[in-house]
Amino acid sequence: MNDLTAGTTGHPDPRLAAAVADVVRARRAGRTRTVAVCVALTGAVLAAFCASLAFGDLYVPLGDVIATLAGGGDGGSRFVIVDLRLPRALIGLLVGAAFGLSGAVFQTLLRNPLASPDVIGISSGAGAAGVLAAVGFGASGFVLSASALLGAVVAAAAIYALAWRDGVAGYRLVLVGIGIGAALSSMISHLLTSSDVADAQNALAWLTGSLNGRSWEQLRPLVVALALLVPPTFLAARPLGTLQLGDDTAMGLGTRVERARLALLACAVALAGVATAAAGPVAFVAFVSAPIARRLVPRQGAALLPAALTGALIVLVADFAAQHLLGSTQFPVGVVTGVIGAPYLLWLLARANRAGRGG
């Protein structure tokens, strides 16, 4: 029988037809809401982006900002907007999007809200490698960024290898990652306390997560890296829905579980490593972006695009607050994101403990 809504007599079953219609309406409503949320988040990101270009020691009206970006404006405006503020704002936007996308992949794939690169040791690996390169070998610029990316990859490989037991369970990977992250944090502390004071101060500012002093030099490799990583990430995420059902069910549906999981983890680790290389391990952006996005678009799976937009918005708003809303001192953006993320982490742990999952 070709018609799924037909009964045993060959006539349409009203109840089954109504159920199918309800499913179609629910899917259509979900897609509509996702599009609306993405449009709203894009508008908020653009507003925060324009605010970051307009405000500073010298206020530039929005009309002059747009004119300058279009190639007009005087020399002073072009210097302030194009040379000083634009690369910082673009790096903040791209770093936030990369962290948000990475966190969404990790948390959805491992089915654990704690499975974020800054919680399970990926960012710690990048941070340890970056600090070692900076204070041990005087590295900076591209070498420092490459070291951070390499550190993230090595840490991820070690976590995956230690968590492997005929497959990788999300909870075990999180526990192994937290342990490795703690060890790497101790290594970072040792490097900082045993190095020159000036080198340690510079490394600590980078470790906090900062967009201060960012220029086109840091932006160009970030753009190239994300252009190479984002499309494969969305492509690799196609079987993510079946992977959420569990390994056995996913294999029954024809998914190559370990191959798909490794591809997604590789993309997520690379995204986190690239973002850390550009701005340092900005705390909790990857951790909170996906939960916020999933609340905005409930029952819509991983919500990768909303999570990326949410991450971009968080970093831009946090950097604006760090520059202009906390007194005369400009703080690193990681200070503000840490203030946002730490209470959420405590709340999440408390809720898990009340539900009997906290151990």
Image: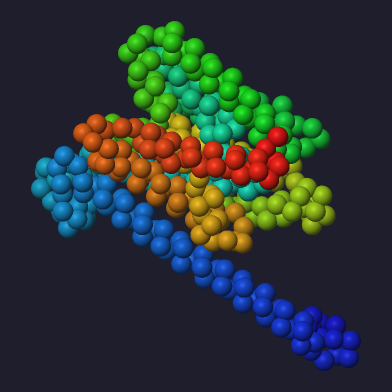
Is 16 drawn above or below residue 29 in the view shown? below
Q: Is residue 8 visible?
A: yes
* Residue positioned 70% across, 34% down in the render: 359
Q: Quadrant of residue 201?
A: top left
* Residue sticking out furthest to the right: 8
What is the tally of numbered marks visible in this picture? 0
132 left or right of 159 in image: left
Measured as percent of width and height from the top left, residue 107 is found at 61, 45
9 left or right of 146 in image: right
* Residue positioned 67% across, 28% down in the render: 176
Is 295 drawn above or below residue 342 in the view shown? below
236 left or right of 80 in image: right
Q: Quadrant of residue 217?
A: top left
* Residue sticking out furthest to the front: 354
* Residue positioned 30% across, 43% down in the render: 320
* Residue positioned 79% across, 57% down in the render: 253
Q: Is residue 231 visible?
A: no
Measured as percent of width and height from the top left, residue 319 is found at 33, 41
Is 202 drawn above or below residue 195 in the view shown? below
Measured as percent of width and height from the top left, residue 121 is found at 58, 29
